[in-house]
Amino acid sequence: MARTLRTLGMAFTAAAMLLAGTTASAKPKLTGEEQLAKMLEGRVAGAPVDCIFMPTVSSSRVIDKTAIVYDAGRTLYVQRPKTGAESLDDNDVLVTRLTGSQLCSIDTVQLYNRGVGNFWRGFVGLDKFVPYTRPAKVASAQ
């Protein structure tokens, strides 16, 4: 009986150490603002624009409760919605209906949850787009 309890105790101790190691090595999830700052690191903001030309956009990314980032190659356009930003979730699919080739600050984007249940979650009302680009490298004088 004592041997069984000792073996059981060692098993519990090993499990506790394993769990403690996993918890200690897990990185805390970045906030939306922190994720956006990391994504824009090394880039410079330009003057806000009313519309972006969608054929140049290769992808978009939802930043939780913060923004939508549209990747147009050298330029990342950051969209901080006027309404509904708090409902942005990185598990959402963006559904955009364009009447032309541009997405503009007067448009809305619907949010569709791709998780369990697949349902419409609402929409966000857009604002101006802020372009972020990397500064041009200056040749050093020799």
Image (cartoon, rainbow, N blue to C red):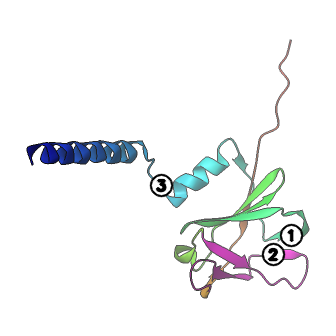
First of labels 1, 3 by sequence position: 3
Contact, mark 2 vs mark 1 (Cβ under 8 Å)? yes
Q: Nearer the viewer, residue 14 or 73?
A: 14
Q: CA separation, marks 2 and 1? A: 6 Å
Residue 85 in the image, given as x and y percentages of width and height = 57, 74
Near mark 1 (Cα within 10 A), the count class, few <14, some 14-19 or many ≥20, is: some
Residue 116 in the image, given as x and y percentages of width and height = 56, 81
Residue 140 in the image, given as x and y percentages of width and height = 83, 20
Q: Is residue 130 magenta?
A: no
Q: Report helix, strand or loop for mark 1.
A: helix
The residue drawn where x is 39% and y is 46% is 22
Near mark 3 (Cα within 10 A), the count class, few <14, some 14-19 or many ≥20, is: few
Q: Report helix, strand or loop for mark 2.
A: strand
Quarter containing the C terminus: top right
First of labels 2, 1 by sequence position: 1
Which range of residues does the magenta coloring cover?
A: 91-118
Residue 1 in the image, given as x and y percentages of width and height = 9, 49
Residue position marked by numbered label 3 in the rendering: 29
Q: Report helix, strand or loop for mark 3.
A: loop
Residue position marked by numbered label 2 in the rendering: 103
What's the mark number on residue 54?
1
